[in-house]
Image: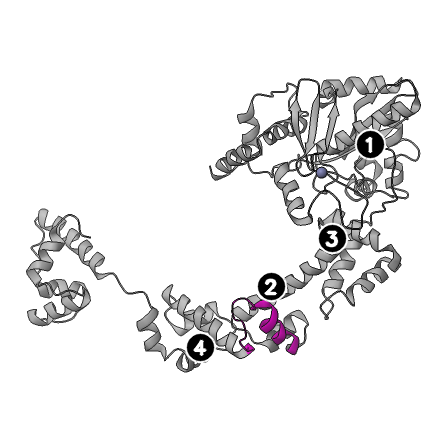
Amino acid sequence: MKKKRLWIQKSKEYGNLNVIYDICDIIINLDRKSDIIINNRNLIHQENELLNKPWEIVDYYFDNIGFCRKSSDSSIIRHNYIPIKFLSNNMKLKCKYCGHELTNNDISGLYKAKRLQLWEVDQNKNPNDITIYLINWRKNQDDKYLKFPGLFYPGMTRKTAKERVYGNGGHFYKAFSNPKTAIEYTIRKYGLNPKKAQKLFKVEVLQIVEDQGTQKATQELANTIESFWIGFFHSQFYEFGRNIEPGGSIVRKSIILPFDSLDKALHEACMLPRIGAISRKPYVYDKLGMRETQNRILDNSIEFWYGFTLARFENVIRFKRFNIIQNLFELGYKTAYISNEINADRHDIIRWIEEDIYINKYLGLSYKEIRIALLSDKIKKYVSEGQITPELLLNVLPGFKNSDAIKHFIRQRLGGWNNLIANYALKEDYWLKAKNLFKQRKNEIELGRSSDYTAVEFAQALGSNTIHTSAAIKFLKRKLDTDMNWLEIKSLLSKKKID
Ligand SMILES: [Zn+2]
């Protein structure tokens, strides 16, 4: 239910974006249904309710990376296209951020029947025609559909799609001999071997750009069409595909490092004791056998596989470490323990706590003062939430050595245990309890099992052990915090509603 409301909200917000959602659904459902039910949104939404929507993922990237360029020193651009015009056979995409537009007058390749037909046409095409093929990956090794949306890789070739992908020197061949591009690494990684890979990664023909008279004109049109399909599938984004370039024939040298080795090198770099970029970058270079001049390769690869730039990656590590420190510190642990956990110097941890982590909350306080203020607040909060014994507090603040250490802290900083409980433990709502007791008694009276409460009986029901009426009334007045006499209390509690 919640998901659905979110979706409705999203589609209002983005207007046209629900169109692309439907289109992507069509693509993803092509193999499952021979009939394409464009209008049967309910069915489609039910199926994909829990899956991420493309614009959410793309928005994530743009929120995190910035605008259309990949990184500040990269020449590669990627736009966040949404369809602004969608007719039966043509579509116009527009970048949400910079307004860049792409048009395609033949999107019939979205239909499976058409793609099957194009596969046949492609075998005997005019040698000047340019084929736009699509490698896609929608099922996992167990033949189950991947979560929305799967991976896409549109490309173009003067050869046939079959030859470009399966032929000698084609993507599959290179994947298992000498992978160079991201799609080839992916085919190798998930395909495991050529035979399995061919089952897993489907190859189809999306569109054939026919001879425009001159080679140049044909190529120019094909460039636009290829860019269109890359933009349509958002396949420059890691979650959607494995295109690095935005499309077109001018292919820059953009080597992408294989994910596994990159990930391993970066992970190990994270664990190095010193914070900051100083020792991490050379470590990664060394590990990957790179030269420092290849900075851009590293930067592009990090951005491609992780979605953020190297500079941000360093920040991410820094904040990740700060997070660990903060979590442990707020559980009551001291620097000696934290220092062991994250492999950092105690003095550095103190400095980060004073100057970075709590800079906004406890400006100008020393490490010790921050610890006292922070743990005092925590203890008060936990007590008010019902952690009303030192043992219970130790469960939520395991950084303290034992419950005596907690008691000691409370004695020194919070005026002692009784004071803490009196001030912060939740007070019992005696009025509510009294009302419920009266209600219960009324039912018993109606059934003839009981008679009206006496003041003594009622005080006893609320926890007193007195047997004298005057003491019982005193007790009730105190507990209910009222000056009313017993009759008044009784009449008030007998009413149906109290407030
Ligand atoms: Zn753009």
Residue type at numbered disc 1: Gly
Q: Exactly how many numbered labels are in the figure?
A: 4
Start-end of magenta stretch: 347-367
The numbered mark at residue 323 is: 2
Observer-side mark, 2 or 4, equals: 2
Residue type at numbered disc 4: Ile
Residue 446 image offset from top left, x and y in percent: 9, 47
The numbered mark at residue 406 is: 4
Residue denoted by label 1: 155
Q: CA distance from mark 4 to mark 3?
A: 44 Å
Query: In what element is the residue under mark 2?
Result: helix
The numbered mark at residue 436 is: none
Residue 67 image offset from top left, x and y in percent: 70, 44
**213 above or below 136?**
above
Q: CA distance from mark 3 to mark 1?
A: 26 Å
Query: In what element is the residue under mark 4?
Result: helix
Residue denoted by label 3: 309
First along the sequence among labels 3 and 2: 3
Q: CA distance from mark 3 to mark 2?
A: 20 Å
